[in-house]
Structure formats: structure tokens, C-alpha cells
Image: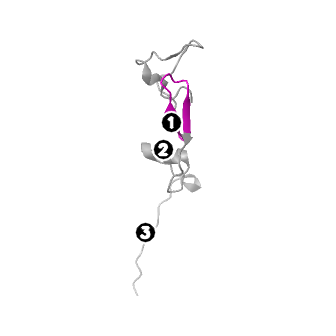
């Protein structure tokens, strides 16, 4: 969490942890259950809050995946795809 949005302060590929002497990845981690509430000017104090529950009843990761446009893959039972039988209207 301490590296969240840290690479946005530097040009691409130059973000570095000076204490550990290691380069940081180009993409910052994504938070699915927390929101950044406050960050001090020198990034010494960072406060996060837990996101509110989704009003549809999904967990946080499913809601984030939906917002990004990712869909769940549907599992097909029986080892293969099944064809549905043709529907017949009842005529009485």
C-alpha cells in the first residue's frame, strides 16, 4: 500500500525505492477493497478507508472487475457444450 500511486510522481521507469535501492514496477498496485483518503505532502502519512459495500451484493473484487468490463467465464457442465432443445409452443 505504501507504493500505491507512487510511480505517478516520477517519469516512466524512474520510480525507485531509495531506502532499499530497488526500482519499482511501471504500474502501481490496484486496491480493490480500500480507497485512499489522505496523503500528506511528503507522503509520510497515508490514510486509507474501506470501500462501502456494493449495492448489488457483489464482493469488492467482482465489482471492480465489472467496472473494468471483465466478465466471469461461465462453466459448462458435462464436459462440453450442450445444445438446447427447440422450444415448442403449446397449442390447445
Q: Alpha carbon of mark 1 to alpha carbon of mark 3: how far?
A: 53 Å
Residue plotted at (51% across, 29% down):
4
**Percent coordinates x, y for residue 25 in the rendering:** 50, 22
Give the foreground label among 2 and 1.
Answer: 1
Q: Residues within 10 Å of mark 1 (few under 14, many from 20)?
A: some
Q: Residues within 10 Å of mark 3 (few under 14, many from 20)?
A: few
Proximity of marks 2 and 1: CB atoms separated by less than 8 Å:
no
SS for tag 3? loop
| N-term-proximal mark, 2 vs 1 | 1
SS for dot 2: helix
Q: Quadrant of the C terminus?
A: bottom left
Q: Is residue 16 visible?
A: yes
Q: Which residue is mark 3?
A: 86
Q: First in sequence: mark 1 or mark 3? A: 1
| Residue 72, image x, y percentages | 50, 48
Compared with residue 90, is residue 5 higher up or lower down, i.e. above or below? above
User: Residue 26 appears at what percent x and percent y?
Assistant: 46, 22
Quickly name the residue at label 2: 65
The alpha-carbon separation of the residues under discs 2 and 1 comes to 19 Å
Q: Which residues are magenta?
A: 31-48
Would you identify the image quadrant in which residue 47 lies?
top right
Please name the residue shown 47% across and 28% down the image: 5
Which residue is located at x 39 percent, y 84 percent? 91
Q: Which residue is mark 1?
A: 36
Within-10-Å neighbours for mark 2: few <14, some 14–19, many 20+? few
Amino acid at each position: 500500500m505504501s507504493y500505491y500511486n507512487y510511480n505517478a510522481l516520477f517519469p516512466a521507469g524512474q520510480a525507485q525505492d531509495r531506502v532499499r535501492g530497488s526500482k519499482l514496477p511501471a504500474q502501481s498496485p490496484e486496491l480493490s477493497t480500500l480507497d485512499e483518503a489522505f496523503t500528506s505532502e511528503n507522503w509520510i502519512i497515508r490514510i486509507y478507508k474501506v470501500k462501502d459495500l456494493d449495492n448489488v451484493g457483489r464482493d469488492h473484487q467482482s465489482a471492480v472487475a465489472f467496472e473494468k468490463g471483465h466478465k466471469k467465464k461461465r462453466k459448462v457442465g458435462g464436459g462440453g457444450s450442450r445444445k438446447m432443445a427447440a422450444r415448442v409452443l403449446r397449442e390447445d
